[in-house]
Amino acid sequence: MLASLRRILALIRKEILAVLKDARTRNMLMIQPVLQCLLFGYAATLDLNNVPYAVLDRDRSTASSALLAKLDGSGVFHRVANLTQADQMKSLIDTQKALVVIQIAPDFQRKLSAGEPSPVQVIADGRNSNTAGAALGYVGAAVDSFNADWRSDHGLPPPPVQVDARAWYNANLETRWNLIPALVGTITMMSTLMLSALSVAREREEGTFDQLLVTPFRPVEIMAGKAIPAMMIGVVQATNALLVAQLWFRIPFAGSYVTLYVGLILFLLAAVGIGLFVSSIAATMQQAMLYAFVTIMPFSLLSGLTTPISSMPRVLQDFTAINPLRYAIDLVHRIYLEGADLGQVLPDLWPMAIIAAVTLSAAAWMFRNRLE
Amino acid sequence: MSGPPIPGLGAKARRVGALIRKESRQVVRDPSSFAIGVVLPLMLILLFGYAMSLDVKNVPIAVVLEDPSSQAAEIAASFQLSPYFQTRVTRSMTDAQALMLSGQVEGIVRVPQDFARRAAQGDAAVQVLVNGIDGNTARIVEAYAEAAVAQSGARVAAEGQDAGSAGGQATVESQLWFNSANDSRYFLVPGLIVLIITLIGAFMTSMVVAREWERGTFEALFVTPVRTDEILLGKVVPYFVLGMGGLLLCMGAAKFLFDVPIRGSIPILLGVSMLYLLVSVATGLLISSSLKSQFLASQVTLVVTFMPALMLSGFLYDLHSVPLAIKLVSYLVPARYFVSLLQTLFLAGDVWSVILPNAAILAVVAIVMLALTRRATRKTLG
């Protein structure tokens, strides 16, 4: 037992040296999570704040300018053009100079004063229907706020029923609060899965794997020697990403670090298990990388990182049951933002434990049968 | 460039031909090429076409009905009938909060006890609590609740005496150009083509030169009469052909499987796609021949090509709203120009003022990348 432990420790040392002795690899592994969190934290937001829009105001009344003032003052839109003719709208949208064009009819104020519904025509560039939909939402909000002002200025009562909306855990509904904790799982999975898949493939390609086999190491020890260093690197990467979330983006941490790290270690175990299983199939590094990637792709697309799982078809929702990243993202969200304790995240923990157990034993079986 | 004098064009063509043959065989005989050339594009097409949808559906919510009046029940029913929600009706707020804490519902709509009475007086409120972690879903729940409540409110006002106070509002009439059905596939599928070309182009090539360095076969090439540009041509051609296969697969799926319209002309679409494929292949080769390590090359390729193509190209997230520094970085991402081209060519048509500048930038990037690769692949011992 003790001898086995010593052998594993020796392997871990060797493996860490092999990965980290090269300065370029070292930097790559440590800086990359920080850089990705920073870049994507700023880039990946569905909150709009600088939408170019154009106006065709045919009314030129106090009401129409009050409405436009609402848009200009929302901090979301900035006006790029004041149009005079309807045929100018098409070219502005076509050339992507404006994302939204607003047309106010000549009888806008007259209809409002007469107590009739007064339509404002809004055209949005649907090439990215996601952004366009969000922009239309913001226009709607500006119009609502204009209506409220109009009613109170003209002595009309407010609408009889109002909605009092409040968001828990992320009061301002910032996309970033959702994304960065999710990236902690995604980035570490990509690195550790590839690291473990490639480290065995590299030894195979260089022929040193055969040398390992003539040493007293047992296949399980070799596997532990490959798995543990990859997990250690994963933990450091996750820590780096968490530091960016807290120190740079100032996203408040609501939970306990012990719970979070217990969850992350289970997750990394599952990721490394998948990586080792992939490496047991691959003959070369290129193969290992491509197979690893073919695995990472559906895992990251079906994890809830970019699109909600509840909108997916039933079959694929069922498939996400074997996706460790799905549990990891949920786990980090709930611990980080909601402050969930170990008992509350149990539904995320045991599936990851099962995935780890299955993939690691499958990998061990593959190794033994290929080796002995 | 030190090399033997060129005997003639025929010999050059023969050498390049031999290299292409060797590289192609290597591609064809390796089962992992099949994985990335066929399995991955097919998988992505199906995932993007059927699985990924930003349209919110089936969001689990709880409706707390503290008021037994018919008007309150009407609001609850409008949630129950909506395809956006999976509604559970509870009688107490404590139950609903327990569901929210255990993650079983994403939001709570609370109709308070005195709702009907206060609605008659004109100052009723419905409380909406959402789990804000997924801000996008949360916003949709809020907006829907507001619409449902406003409808019910309008009905109350119409039934009341002062019908006039309901009118006199500005209303929004929106039009979504190029995608009037607001189908998120319309913009996911062109984005998918960008991802697949990036993957096939850059990923496979990022390993090939590094592998030859690691195995020492590159040094063996030194003593042959092949020249650097011939080696490069031998590497570019097979992967370019493979990438074209993936491209045609995607375009076919876009047109016939998902009914995404192609409003621009197909030759231009193919032309700009080939340009971007060339950029990807050259990027992969550049990374490979400058790093000379397969592990490092694979990681760098992931971070430099794939992740930016997904996150910084304007395909998923709008680039107008990012801070200046990130915007500047996004100008360095070739995928950005390709996304703009594809969205326009698929959905808007041949808008030359979009096509020409973007295509020109891609062409310049391709040339620069190939030139840099040529410099990095000198036949010298490092």
Image (cartoon, rainbow, N blue to C red):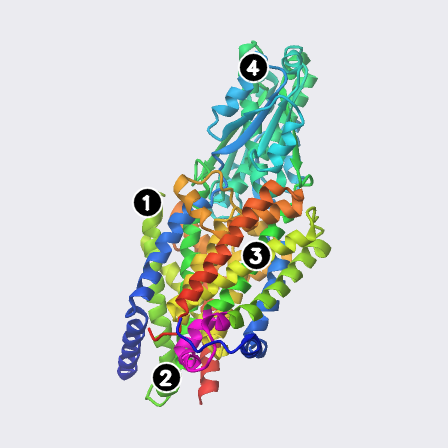
Above or below residue B370? Residue A277 is below
The amino acid pointed to by label 2 is Thr
Chain on which label 1 sits: A
> Regarding mark 3 in the picture, which secondary structure is present there?
helix
The amino acid pointed to by label 1 is Trp
The location of residue B263, given as percent across then percent down, is 70, 46
> Regarding mark 2 in the picture, which secondary structure is present there?
helix
Quick check: can you spot residue A55? yes
Q: CA distance from mark 3 to mark 1?
A: 38 Å
> Regarding mark 1 in the picture, which secondary structure is present there?
helix
**Pointer 2 residue:** A208
Could you tell which of marks 1 and 4 lies nearer the N-terminus? 4
Q: CA distance from mark 1 to mark 4?
A: 42 Å
Pick the front one: B299 or A156: B299
> Regarding mark 4 in the picture, which secondary structure is present there?
helix
| Quadrant in which the C terminus of chain B appears | bottom left
For disc 2, the neighbor class at 10 Å (few under 14, some 14 to 19, many from 20) is few
**Pointer 3 residue:** B275
**Pointer 1 residue:** A248
Q: CA distance from mark 1 to mark 2?
A: 43 Å
What residue lies at 30% left-to-right and 45% top-to-bottom?
A247
The amino acid pointed to by label 3 is Leu
Q: CA distance from mark 2 to mark 4?
A: 78 Å
Task: Report if the CB atoms under discs 2 and 3 are less than 8 Å apart.
Answer: no
Q: Which residues are magenta?
A: B207-232
The location of residue A81, given as percent across then percent down, is 55, 26
Q: Nearer the viewer, mark 3 or mark 1?
A: 3
